[in-house]
Image (spheres, grey):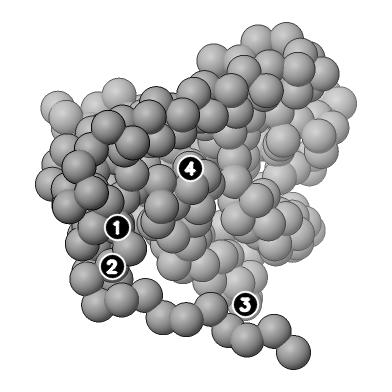
Amino acid sequence: MVDPAPPLRRDAERNRRLLLRTAYERMAVEGLDVSYEDIARAAGTGMGTVYRRFPQRQDLLDALFGEHIDTVIGFAEQAWRYEDAWAGLCWFLERQLEVESGSRGLGELLRSRHQATELVRRAHERMTPLVADLIDRAVRAGRLPAGATPADFAAVHVMVGSVMDASRAVDPRLWRRALRIALAGMRHADLSDDPPDEAVIGHLYNDPRDEGTAHDRTARRPDRRSQHQGDLLRDHAHARRLPADHPDLGGHGR
């Protein structure tokens, strides 16, 4: 058996919580582009402290948003138990977007404006069959037109989320109106053409700023890792120049 990891020292755990609180507050307002440098500055710690606690950015995002994503999965599971499948779908989308409205960073993560973490991929894998079953039941009950697919509702999620992001600072309630419009359109849409392939869902939730094929995106990933490694090297070089009793090498990070 492998011994469990020893608990963090009290000051290290305090700093970890401080970093998480600071990162969440910044990302809730500014989105996922907040840098480690900005987080460290706002928290009053050194860059080395952030990297020691969260060596990979995915570690930080999972720690920040794991509980929120579990909440959204719970919404999907609860909606699936609705006898009126259409009411369940509407309830689920509204609850999910309500959670996203409280944090720009969470919305960007769930709608994958950045490279999705494994946590988000698993969430989509768990939610998609639940939504698909609700759609199928709503179609059979005559509450949705034949041909409605999970990809259609993924498009609604992305579209209304875009309205939310664009209006967050001027009218944070506008997304609710956009959702009502989109859902009303779904109920009365002519969906007699060929339905989109299920793979469309994955493309909808990819970073829209990335162009080209999946192969192209994969080919560019080492550049992102290289940038991260460059940050680490610069931070380590900075640490070597600090005196031994500097807080970045002591109480802030161990």
User: Cα distance, mark 1 to mark 3?
Assistant: 46 Å
In this rendering, is residue 16 above or below 117?
below
Image spot of residue 221 (x, y percent):
67, 24
User: Cα distance, mark 2 to mark 4?
Assistant: 19 Å
Q: Which residue bears the numbered disc 4?
A: 57
Corner quadrant of residue 34: top left
Question: Looking at the image, is mark 1 or mark 2 earlier in the sequence?
Answer: 2
Q: Which residue bears the numbered disc 1?
A: 253
Question: Looking at the image, is mark 3 or mark 4 earlier in the sequence?
Answer: 4
Q: Is residue 33 left or right of residue 139?
A: left
| Residue nearest the observer in this picture, 73 or 146 | 73
- Amino acid marked by disc 4: Arg
Mark 4, Cα crowd under 10 Å, few <14 / some 14-19 / many 20+, is: some
State the residue at coordinates (40%, 35%). 236
Q: Which residue bears the numbered disc 3?
A: 81
Which dot marks residue 12?
2
Question: Looking at the image, is mark 2 or mark 4 earlier in the sequence?
Answer: 2
The quadrant in which the C terminus is found is bottom left
Inspect this view and state whether residue 45 appears. no
Question: Looking at the image, is mark 2 or mark 3 earlier in the sequence?
Answer: 2
Question: Looking at the image, is mark 4 or mark 1 earlier in the sequence?
Answer: 4
User: Cα distance, mark 4 to mark 1?
Assistant: 17 Å
- Amino acid marked by disc 3: Arg
Element at label 2: helix
Pointers 1 and 2 in contact (C-beta within 8 Å): yes
Mark 2, Cα crowd under 10 Å, few <14 / some 14-19 / many 20+, is: some
The quadrant in which the N terminus is found is bottom right
